[in-house]
Image (tube, coloured by chain):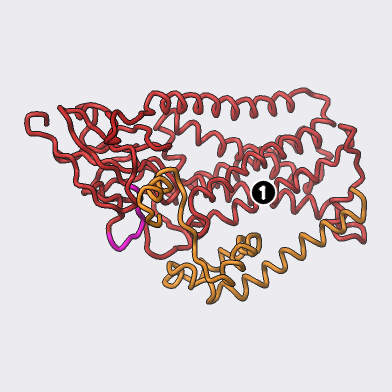
Chain colours: A orange, B red
Amino acid sequence: MTLWMARAVATSVEAYLMAGALFALVFLPRGVLAMDEGLRASPVMVRVLLVPGMMLLWPIFLRRWITGRGAPAERTAHRSAAVRRTGARP
Amino acid sequence: MSTSYRTVAWNANKRRYDMVAVSLVVASTALFIAIQAIADPALTIETLLIRALGANAFLLLHVILCIGPLARLDARFLPLLYNRRHLGVLMCTLALAHGGFGLVQFHTAGTLDPLVNLLAADGRYGEIGRFPFQVLGFAALIVLSLMAATSHDFWLHQLTAPVWKALHMGVYVAYALIVLHVLFGVAAEETQPWLLVLLAGGALTVFGLHAIAGLREARRDRAADAEADDASGFVDVCHVDDIPERRAVITCLAGERVAVFRYEGRVSALSNVCQHQNGPLGEGRIVNDCIVCPWHGYEYLPESGASPPPFVERVPTFDVRLVGGRVHVNSTPNPPGTRVEPARIPADTV
């Protein structure tokens, strides 16, 4: 890999992770509660544990935060078939 | 099961499991360092540490990869499966330590950002002896870190189990990258064939176990795969006597396995797929009126596929009927948590 390519990759990775860290700092204290009630009664350490994952997956949660969506419904063959049968949400 | 998240859902078994795992890793690392130090006294402590951490992370990865197929082939390995996540985090910790020490040792002497230095390291992709193998290790570390960082149940819930499992299938990508990392990084310099033999042996063991377990599962699914017998959509699954009390027979309907349970003169059918981590409910048993998943103990009421309050997990259920002692299951599932009247086993059949 040439030096300019290596610089570009390294800078991108570092910028992505820093953006994720910033997002985690803003989102995890309160914003995440709207998405997952299970965190409300959980120890603070749980949210600390979530920081590394949030730094890596922050675009998904930023989008959900902006659109107001919660966790998606699980999709398995049976759940999809049940939806087709009744139109009920899984 | 819990209505709120815990940092780690500790219990006596998990503590024992982790203590044994950490003890074995510490002992293995110390042994590796001792053997290497005796074989080559010129090696510095930094080099010994980097090699020991890398070797033990790689060894632990093999163990982790073998647990899955072994548990499918022999239920005695199931106790190793239920806390496998902790092994994964331990392995990633070792790998990060290996990578971190390596980065400091080899890429911080100059003026460049260590990561830039690693990525731009002099190497030729066309020459085995000069292949930039550290980039492969870095790529594997990214995959392993993503998996370790998303190992908590929060991610299972937020991503849903099928997506979470697909993400964690990245362990095979990481394994391939690490095999190449070792092949190009170490094997190219080694004059003794033992390392290549070990590497090949490890890969063959992982691949072989997966192939054997996969073929067995595919054969089981082909044998169990059933089509609807008539316009009513019901499928003849088995005789009621084939189902042990408080256990299940597993069949395939609507593209996925279905667990048909027998309990207290009744028969119920529900999706075999646990909502927690898609474990096989049909391999569990009914305890205190609830089906208990053999992987992590998640519970479901057999008539409704719903977890007992205050828990909210639900799995799809299936209509069931008994015809002349034969269990018929409707091939179309009901939405998760739908209560279905169990089929009653006639007194003369019990």
The local secondary structure at tag 1 comes to helix
Q: Is residue A33 left or right of residue B54?
A: left
Which residue is outermost to the front? Answer: B231
Chief secondary structure of the magenta portion: loop
Residue B131 in picture, x, y percent from top left = 86, 37
Residue B47 in picture, x, y percent from top left = 79, 45
- The amino acid beneath tag 1 is Val
Quarter of the figure with residue B113: bottom right
Measuring 39% from the left and 32% from the top, which residue is drawn there? B75
Quarter of the figure with residue B221: top left
Measuring 30% from the left and 63% from the top, which residue is drawn there? B310
Residue A48 painted magenta: no
Residue A18 in picture, x, y percent from top left = 72, 68
Q: Is residue B207 left or right of residue B279?
A: right
Q: Is residue B78 above or below residue B95?
A: above
Q: Quadrant of the N terminus of chain B?
A: bottom left
From the viewer's side, name the closer residue of B43 and A71. Answer: A71
Q: Which residues fall within the magenta stretch?
A: B309-316
Residue B310 painted magenta: yes
From the viewer's side, name the closer residue of B114 and B333. Answer: B333
Mark 1, residues whose alpha carbon is within 10 Å: few (<14), some, or many (≥20)?
many
Q: Is residue B170 left or right of residue B246?
A: right
The answer, for residue B70, to whether it is visible in the render is yes
Q: Is residue B166 above or below residue A88?
A: above
Quarter of the figure with residue B126: top right
From the viewer's side, name the closer residue of B220 and B191. Answer: B220
Q: Is residue A10 above or below residue B137?
A: below
Where does label 1 land, which residue? Answer: B143
